[in-house]
Image (spheres, rainbow, N blue to C red):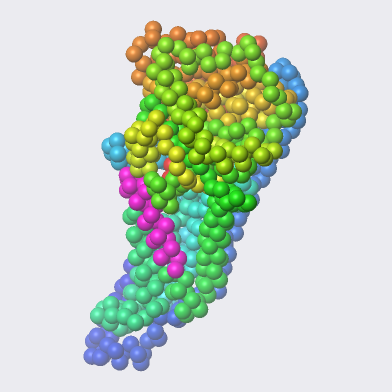
Amino acid sequence: MPIIQGFSRLAREITGNKRDTSNSHSDTTTYNSSIRPDYSSGLAGVNLELDLKLSTWLVSSICAVLFVVLAMRAFHLFTAYTRQIHSMQSSSLEQNYWTYDRTWWLPWLKREFIYAPLGNKRHNREWQLSQAVNYGTLPGRAHTILLTLYVLSNIVYCTLLPYGKQEAAKTIAELRGRAGVLAVVNMIPLVLLAGRNNPLIKLLRISFDNFNLFHRWIGRIVILESIVHVCAWYANYSARHGVDKSLNSFSGNIFLTSGLVAVLGMIFLLFQSLSALRHAFYETFLHGHQIMAFVVLGGVYIHLDVEKLPALPYMNMVVGGWIVERILRLVWILWLNIGYKRRETTKVIIEALPGEACRVTFQLPRHTIIRPGSHVYAYLPKFSWWMSHPFSVAWTNPESEPPTGPLVADRDENSEGSSLLNKETLDHAIVEEGLVSAALKSPNYLEREADYSSLITKRKIPPTSLSLICAARTGMTRKIYEAAMQAPARTIFTSGFIEGAYAGHDNLASYGTVVMFAGGAGITHHLVQIRHLLACAHARTVATRKIVLVWSVRDLEALSWVAPWMDEILKMPGRREMLTMHLFVTKARGPADYVSPSRSIELKGARCQPGVILDKVLRRAPSEGGRVGACFVSVCGPGALADEVRKAVRERIWVGALEMNEESFTW
């Protein structure tokens, strides 16, 4: 109310001054030029000292939050490192100390803030008007608190004006300067959080998805402050020079024109980035967003540079950061996908799979490390020009993993192997798999790629090969699936690039028990993690003694997506003792159609209930197949499944030492 009253008082004062002027002066131009100072341009009326102080406060508050998060992350990493060192050579019973949290406040903080949705349960399940139109997701409780404080601080800083202590035009000029400076200062975190190479991701171990949430809200703040900046300028300019002259003031004035172009570009970005439009036309959104962001940055820079305004150093940081991030991405892409000596490039194999999905394999010309749980951005120019799409890395050659300990080449001969995947209900999927595998081994293909194959065999460390699973949705994923279905042997050989790998900073090595929930193609986030943990456990370099994989699919065809990789996992040494699998088929014909092939692999024709799974793990002793030591819960899949897992974890946060991570791509 005080803010609204203040603006009303300003409006009455400037209106009253204008009314008095009309009564005593017939020539408005003479009045404006001879009596009142010009607060419509330049720095007249702008409180530079206070603007600088408030900008410093804003940046300091951001740094303070980052420091608190960094301190919490350091505490978490120290605890995890201590737990791993103590537990990696310990038996299951010797990890009992780590079964429960030793503080009362940490479980409470996890339940009420860190893992808490805004309301009761809904967080990553999208609000949908129809199957094709959705309105985005709700931020978590901790995110909401931080965003609310950030928005309120900007409102307070903008409206901290000397109401009634000076003439209205000067106060409006001060508002103009304040909003403009804050808008530019806010562009620093705006650009930083939008970058895929944001250094805070590795420093704080926070996913890009979380930073992207703050990027969207800070962008809205920048746009609103820019609109306030323009409106404040227009209020003073039109009051002094008249409406007609104010509309013609942009002609031939690069200072005003560049500012207007930047604000109009921001308004375009505001409407274009609405969730319904962003998700319905994602590729169009990416094209328009990147082009218009370039226009906005250029317009604001020219606007500040022409008059050498005090906010120009901030803008130099913004433009410099944006350019450096783009150059780093380009250099990384070129280094990763173009060979140094023979200038070979990345080869891509696209295979159509049952269940409307594709397996896309990138054969890089060089070796790189792919951390478990990573994702990459895939470039397929044949289908999407220069645009990239994020996908979890489903599989890679073992040499591209981080070190696991002593190299172990033996396999568990007593493992059940691919008994689950060879059931009669999967015969049609295996046939399709055989056709694709035969196509990859065809002589024609080997002849065409002879140079590349010989290059691999001559190197001591083979180049990296990684595979993605792309479920056919809309846009690029639908294009490549339809093209692969029409290709010979349902396989396409083409070229492409990858950017990454990013993330993969969830170190599971210190947890005695790891529970992984996956929905549909979300299984890709967990496969390399499982292989890595099994290999490390066999080498006694991790604390993990129990892995529970829970995979929910619509039909059995989805199991063929990962059939060859799951076969390798099932043959790994120690797999029988460590890995338990629960497979749920939601569109099953009936429970009688599915029979579990072993004690460690359970197949059900039902919907997954995360709470029931966690109860089996958490409330049983290790000797009864229950959890060992600290427990980590990971989920990657549809928003509805992720919300159910989050709810189940929060309800059982006091049962033991529980932590969770949710892998999502909500942008």
Is residue 263 within the magenta segment?
Answer: no
Main SS class of the magenta portion in the image: helix
Q: Quadrant of residue 114?
A: top right
Quick check: 662 left or right of 657? Answer: left
8 or 526, nearer to the observer? 526
Boundaries of the magenta span? 274-298
Expressed as whole percent of the image width and height from the top left, the position of residue 199 reads 60, 52
Expressed as whole percent of the image width and height from the top left, the position of residue 408 reads 71, 24
Name the residue at 55% across, 39% down: 450
Expressed as whole percent of the image width and height from the top left, the position of residue 196 reads 53, 50
Is residue 287 within the magenta segment?
Answer: yes
Name the residue at 65% across, 34% down: 399
Name the residue at 54% across, 37% down: 466
447 or 52, nearer to the observer? 447
Expressed as whole percent of the image width and height from the top left, the position of residue 626 reads 61, 15
Q: Quadrant of residue 431?
A: top left
558 or 642, nearer to the observer? 558
Look at the picture and state if 136 lies above or below 510. below
Quick check: 642 left or right of 450? Answer: left
